[in-house]
Image: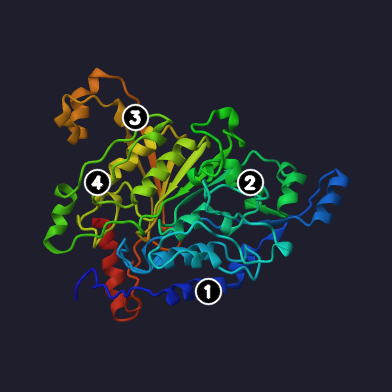
Amino acid sequence: MTFPPPSIHVEATPDVIQSWYEEQWDVDDYRRFVEGWYDDVGDDDDRQYQQQQKQQQQLTRPIVFGTIDDHDYGQNNGDITYQYKRESNLAFIDFMYSGVDDAGESNSCAQDVDESNQYNGVCESSQDESNSPKKVVYEDNNNPNQLHEFQTKRRSKSNDPMYQRALEGKGVYGVSLFDFSRTKRSRQSSEELKNDSILWGGGYWVPDEDAMIDPDIISRTNIEEPFDETDINYSTTHSVAIFALDVRSNKTPWSKGKQTSTQNTHNEGSTSTPSNNNTSSSSIIHTPALDFLGQHQWEWFQKALSNSYATVNIIVSGLQFHPERFPNDGNVIEEWSKFPRARQMIYDMILNSGANSPMLVSGDVHMAQFMRKDCVRSSDIIYADADDAGDTATSFKANAQQRPYRPRPLVEITTSGMTHSWGTSFSSQPRNHRLPLKLYTYFVSPIFMTIC
């Protein structure tokens, strides 16, 4: 008997992935939550406002937003080699929009990507437009992403740039903005109700066209970057931007066998460090040879961060950023530190972007953690010579006295503990949760977690 138990995971087919999401949608409590509720009018003294509220029957619905990790993806320790990655990405976004788009809307956009994953630039709903809110339509012209004038700010899958990226095979990553300065009445303004009778995210959600954080949304307009703070349509003191990153669809596979212990230190190519100002969107990014995000996602993330004036910026990843656990083998324990250049690159990108109050949220490890690293901007480091740049820690210590610097804490919250308890078996194999193996795995798991 070995520990950890040998993997018996089988890659999921699109039909299996779809069955997972259908099973979750069939849970009554979850479905009722997603379908929303009508706000209580309350004790407002303004009778006219109360009457208007009742007549409008304002429906409040939550925003379901996030990204995938390996078991959502369909492949244990999943990476770019997964043959159904595009189908998995689309199924995930379909699930996020379960109950959102009007019944009868077909996934016609999925048919607009041919077998070679080449996007043809046309994506539109098959619904009768006379009976449904209008969708974004992309045309093959000089600007294939140009919005039509009748495009509304209604929350819809076909309007979501995250969906468009999944169609193009780039992965499932995006950003959502919430403005908590909005009062109840401002969230229910007549202009918003004209576009949509639903209070998305309690009315705090800011439509992508107002947030202007997602670079693919900005490319549909004539607005030039970088923005001036006076152009921002949301509070810069009461807002939260959530960036969801996809660490699976473009991830380099973990090495197998004897190469595993040396892959992280000898086989990585050089990377360029992003510039330390909000014009970083114009800098060239060279992705590391051992990578999690892929070229397009790195470029997207750098531009999106520089576009955000939110009070707090939360970066979500399926894998943990800060830990450096034993053994140094991604096949056993997955985390950003197994690809050190990629991790350093995302640290630099976050801190050099100037984004306010960055915070990391992660999962994967089946337990909750709260971690902090005190970081220094790479732009504050003075290297003795070009060769020293490869050893950041040594170079910084040697030159710390030459230039003042201010450490900046980077906090990470791992939320796996919301569904798992520390010390219980972290095995996903049903046989390890049944006697007699249950006694073994539940005894060894807390010991193994403590050592790691």
Where residue 22 is drawn, which disc sits there? 1
Label ID, residue 340: 4
Circle 3/circle 4 CB separation < 8 Å: no
Q: Amino acid at mark 2?
A: Tyr
Query: Compared to 430, does 147 lie above or below?
Result: above
Q: Position of residue 330 (x, y in %)?
A: 24, 58
The circle drawn on residue 351 is none
| Mark in front: 1 vs 3 | 1
Q: Which residue is mark 2?
A: 204
Indicate the amino acid at tag 1. Answer: Glu
Q: Secondary structure at mark 2?
A: loop
Looking at marks 1 and 3 on the same chain, the residue that comes earlier in the sequence is marked by 1
Q: Nearer the viewer, residue 344 or 326?
A: 344
Identify which residue is drawn at 42% across, 45% down.
300
* Residue under pointer 3: 407
Mark 1 and mark 3: Cα distance apart in space: 47 Å
* Dot 3 or dot 4, earlier in sequence: 4
Alpha carbon distance from label 1 to label 2: 28 Å
Q: Residue at x 31, y 74 (%)?
A: 9
- Front residue of this view, candidates 402 and 413: 402
Inter-mark Cα distance, 2 to 4: 37 Å
Query: Which residue is nearer to you in this view: 192 or 328?
Result: 192
Q: CA distance from mark 2 to mark 3?
A: 33 Å
Q: Secondary structure at mark 1?
A: helix
